[in-house]
Amino acid sequence: MSYTMIQTNYLTNYFKKIGIFLILFICFSCNKNAQLEKEIEAVPMDLKVERFDQVFMKSTKESLPTLKTQHPFLFPKQTPDSIFLERTQDPIQKLIQKSVDSVFSNFQDTEAELIAFYKHLKYYNPSLKKPRVITVFSDVDYRNKVIVTDSIALISIDNYLGADHEFYESFYNYIRKNLKRDQIVMDLADAYATRLINQPRRKTFLEELIYHGKKLYLKDLWVPLAEDSTKIGYTNDELLWANDNEFYIWQYFIENELLYSTDTKLVGRFIAPAPFSRFNLELDSESPGALGQYIGWKIVRSYMENNPSSLLQMLQMNAQTLFNKAKYKPKK
């Protein structure tokens, strides 16, 4: 038998072993995830979404006092009942109601998604108390799509009618693309993550990266079946661009010494929602916005893959320590 044949047989057996290992690893991971989801499914969550938007639009002079008693936080005391009743007859409000009722004619699927989300949230945060989840109209105030407190979650449902809805025609495309049903849970997850991480002051660009990376990692846990593009609010093409250019994005951050910069303009360039990220290069218009969030997400994922750390430890860890231990190194 020739040396070449021996070498070929060796390599064949080697790759067979690698293939078997990969198959076993994948099966183990799938079984582990399936068992985890069974445990989460068993978490008690008797949640019923309150459709305040529908009830309010049907309210009358006789029924309004009861509605105010049930939802006092939605009725400013200084506003007379006549103003509220006039609102129920306002043509614009009726048009909003018609659109919402059309898009959410079957609200059961959305409610099921919300229940699944809160089960995951409760599993990872046992101290969570079941909130009152209430849908309202906000006259399409996309800057405040959800409001979350310790006991209440308000969902401005008129902000989720679909990217092409006529109400949103005057909005920029990068805003419109996420005014759709599948972002309800994502916006709630973002709001709860903000409260859980509780880091209002971030001085360096690295702190911004890690902060937003932590929030996106929580979406990995709380909404595990969602696509990555949905979690970060990208189109499929935008996520593909980010994945294909991850090495070069990171290289740009390093070569331009951005990680420890305190320049607040970096938030607008790479963190905040925007039509594109601003590298000040010709390719800018091809890129999606908020690529800093994407890189932060990758760093946090790398940390959790390479370190035996609890979720709480990771969330409380400062940006520098997490980054040092993450061993993040994107491939070219």
Image (tube, rainbow, N blue to C red):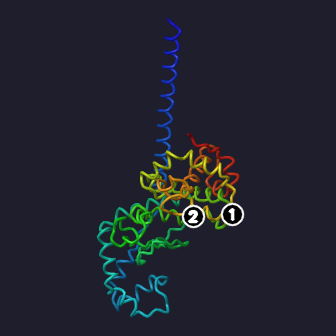
* Front residue of this view, candidates 77 and 256: 256
Residue indicated by mark 2: 268
Per the rendering, the mark at residue 188 is none
Name which residue lies at 37% across and 82% down.
56
Q: As drawn, is 103 to the left or to the right of 221? A: left
Residue indicated by mark 1: 203
Q: Quadrant of the rendered structure where residue 94 is?
A: bottom left
Q: Please, what is the three-letter code of the amino acid marked with disc 1? A: Lys
Q: Quadrant of the C terminus?
A: top right
Cα separation between marks 2 and 1: 14 Å
Earlier-in-chain disc, 2 versus 1: 1
Residue 308 in picture, x, y percent from top left: 64, 45
* Front residue of this view, candidates 85 and 177: 177
Name which residue lies at 36% across and 65% down.
162
Name which residue lies at 45% across and 75% down.
141
* Front residue of this view, candidates 83 and 135: 83
Q: Please, what is the three-letter code of the amino acid marked with disc 2? A: Gly
Q: As drawn, is 322 to the left or to the right of 95? A: right
Residue 144 in picture, x, y percent from top left: 49, 73
Q: Are marks 2 and 1 in contact (CB under 8 Å)?
A: no
